[in-house]
Amino acid sequence: EWSPSGEKVAEGCTHPRTICHQCVQRHIHEEVRGKGQVTDIRCPLVASAECGATLTYGDVQRQASAADFEQYDRLLLLRTLEAMPEFLWCARPGCGNGQLHPDRDRQPIFSCQS
C-alpha cells in the first residue's frame, strides 16, 4: 500500500518517502524480531546511503504491527533497565525478573517475587 502523503519514514528523514508502509513494517519486524534491535533502527534507505535517520519511538509505534511494537516496547524497557547500574536480574534459574537495588553490593539482599 503506497501512501505518498508526505509522511516520512523517520522523523529525521530529509528525503521524500519512497517506500511503502508494508516494506517499512517488514523492516521494523526484521530489526526487532530478527536482530533484537530496538535502540538504533534506521530508515530502510540507509543501505543506499540516501538516509541514516534513526526511527523514534513514535515512528516505530506509528508504523509497526501491533505485535512487533509490543515486542519493541518490551525489549526497549529491558535494555533501559539493564543500563541502570542499580538494576539487578534475579539469579534464580528461569525467573526472568529483576529489581532496582540502589545499594547494590552494600545490601545484596534480593527477594525473588515469582
Image (cartoon, rainbow, N blue to C red):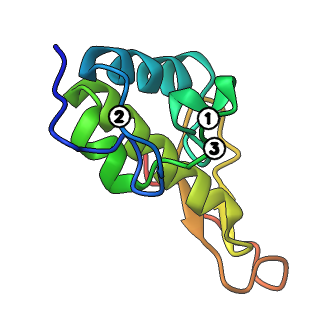
**In the image, residue 39 above or below residue 12:** above
Q: Secondary structure at mark 3?
A: loop
Amino acid type at circle 1 is Glu
Q: Looking at this view, name the residue that lies furthest to the right.
A: 105
Residue at (63% x, 44% y) in the render = 52
Q: CA distance from mark 3 to mark 1?
A: 7 Å
Does the CB distance between marks 1 and 2 fall below 8 Å? Answer: no
**In the image, residue 106 above or below residue 31:** below
- Name the residue carrying label 2: 17
Q: Secondary structure at mark 2?
A: loop
Residue 44 versus residue 63: which sits nearer the camera? Answer: 44
* In-image side of 96 versus 104 (left or right): left
> How many marks do you count on the picture?
3
**Mark linked to residue 50:** 1
Q: Secondary structure at mark 1?
A: loop
**Mark linked to residue 52:** 3
Does the CB distance between marks 3 and 2 fall below 8 Å? Answer: no
Residue 45 rendering spot, x and y as whole percentages: 55, 28
Residue at (30% x, 36% y) in the render = 70
Quarter occupied by residue 4: top left
Q: CA distance from mark 3 to mark 2?
A: 13 Å
Quadrant housing the C terminus: top left
